[in-house]
Amino acid sequence: MLLLNDFIEESLSYSNVTDDLDINIDLINDGFSQDENFIFEREGGLIKVFDRVCDHAGGRLFLKGSKAVCPLHGWQLDIHANSYIDPRCDKQPLLVINEHELDSPLVHQPSINNVLNLLPYTKNESVEVTFINHACMVFNVDDKFSFATDPWVIGSAFSNGWWLLEKSPADVFDTLNKCDFIYISHNHPDHLHPLSLSHIRKDMPILTADFDSGSTVKLLEKAGFENIIKMQFSTRLSDHENELSFSVLKSGDFRDDSGLLVEIGKFKCLLTVDSNFLNFGNLPQNIDLLCSSFAGGASGFPLCFETYTEEEKKKILSRNVGAIRATNIKNIEMTNAQFFLPYAGFFTEGAARDRYIKERNIKNSVEDYQKICDKKSCGLLNVTEFQVYTFKGKKLVSSTAARKANFKELSVEEYIRQTEQLNQTVTDELIEKYFINSGFNDDLVLDLLCTNDDFDQDYNRFIVDFSMARPKIVTALSVGEHLEAACIDSGKRYLRIRVRKSEFFDLIRNGRPWEDLSIGFQCRIYRNPNIYNSAFWFHFTNKYVS
């Protein structure tokens, strides 16, 4: 019997691919400029040189005035400040040049790309890859070793905002409980799903990333799992005798997210899951199977934000689904993938109260990737047609439809009704204590209003000033009608969130991540200034959970 705990942990290795580039400073004008490879800021004889890679999802930055803008997701780099505007994070220049210290106008700047080395395994193992639902797949290695990924297979995710597009097989939990381990990529509930995990045996080994925040581990421990394997991003777990190896790779942005590199004999599979700029672009080449989220529409932005017009929302949504396609094209190219399997996008807005979202939230289909794959000489594996794919080493030998009887579960309405009933005991005092003990400090005032399902009737209001050493609850009477103006005048940011009462109470009672509310369309957000409050969302999504 093979046990993941017995695998050895060893360092990942990389090969360098270097391009030699020369910068002629005589061609760089004062102010801001760009060429094919770099963005420049010149003030007299002092020149800053930036690469054109956006640190969010690896998009290509373009100069726009004194800012560099990424067309994928609209990130803006304040070049002079060395900092992104939305969210707040730094980007350091590659070079800072003083032309008066140079003997020649030519400056040599090598551009280095790292390629993650694959293991030289030689076995032609039989690997059966079965799509279960959404981001859940099962890999079976010659009937001697199996593992599953991210089992959201029943119920809803993101505070009753997401619902599975299709029902899971009736025997889904029998299949999952026979696995040798389960990989959990991150703490979003369509990947770390408490209800689904409640049906998994508690001695099941769970492989997850060792995030600094502990965001997945906290929730897995709360779910009662006894064997959680926290993996560093610089290592792989390997059994060289049986030619099995697994590497958890970091999303290349500020989020707690990860992907998985699977090496089984000659068969190489990379699951990018939802990651942006996975492993900071340092990916392996000649991958046999690339699996990635594909649909888009997986965010409350911009539909849940009151700071955008309907026309602006349409443009942003169109850009976002295009960005998902562009990211997948880039990953197919970088990995030279033989096959591409779109997954982690099979959800719908199933509740009647979310009709506004469902009518507007456009998504890519699997079929939208057919022309892309044809152009890249990459086979498209469509799990809406076939759910089981069998590889023999690097060769795909069969594709089989395997839809079974559906798992029987509650209706959408019954799930929502249960949430309302379970959270009737949450009090104002408990919520105030929750905020005061949060340990969050920032120049931000949160104006939170608990509402009905249509967001047009307020029940409870909590005003929290996070600018002090310890968060302070402010009464509505003391601030009057001009809270927003008072915040801005005092140098604080203002964040107003209207949230469905029952879903917010459920979040408080269970210590769940706040992104469940925004991604799940359960709130409406207004912010002044209109920038992403990244520190707030990261703290209440990854640090202050469970």
Image: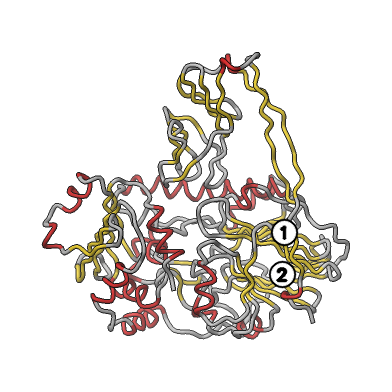
Residue depicted at 69% across the width and 45% down the height: 333
CB atoms of marks 2 and 1 within 8 Å: yes
Q: Secondary structure at mark 2?
A: strand
Please state, as top left, top right, bottom left or bottom right, where the N terminus lies in the image.
bottom right
Where does the image place residue 35, in percent across and percent down from the top left? 57, 25
Where does the image place residue 164, in percent across and percent down from the top left? 50, 72
Horizontally, is 7 left or right of 489 in the view?
right
Q: Is residue 399 above or below residue 24?
A: below
Query: Quick one: 517 or 417, which is closer to the camera?
Result: 517
Amino acid type of disc 1?
Answer: Leu
Residue depicted at 52% across the width and 60% down the height: 256
Where does the image place residue 250, in percent across and percent down from the top left? 60, 56
Horizontally, is 61 left or right of 522 in the view?
right
Residue depicted at 69% across the width and 50% down the height: 283
Residue depicted at 87% across the width and 65% down the height: 123
Instruction: Give me the disc on residue 289.
Output: 1
Q: Is residue 98 above or below residue 354?
A: above
Amino acid type of disc 2?
Answer: Val
Instruction: Give me the disc on residue 129.
Output: 2
Give whichever of discs 2 and 1 has the lower sequence position.
2
Residue located farthest toward the right when viewing the structure as drawn:
122
Horizontally, is 528 left or right of 321 in the view?
left
* Residue 341 visible in rendering: no
Location of residue 412 (image quadrant): bottom left
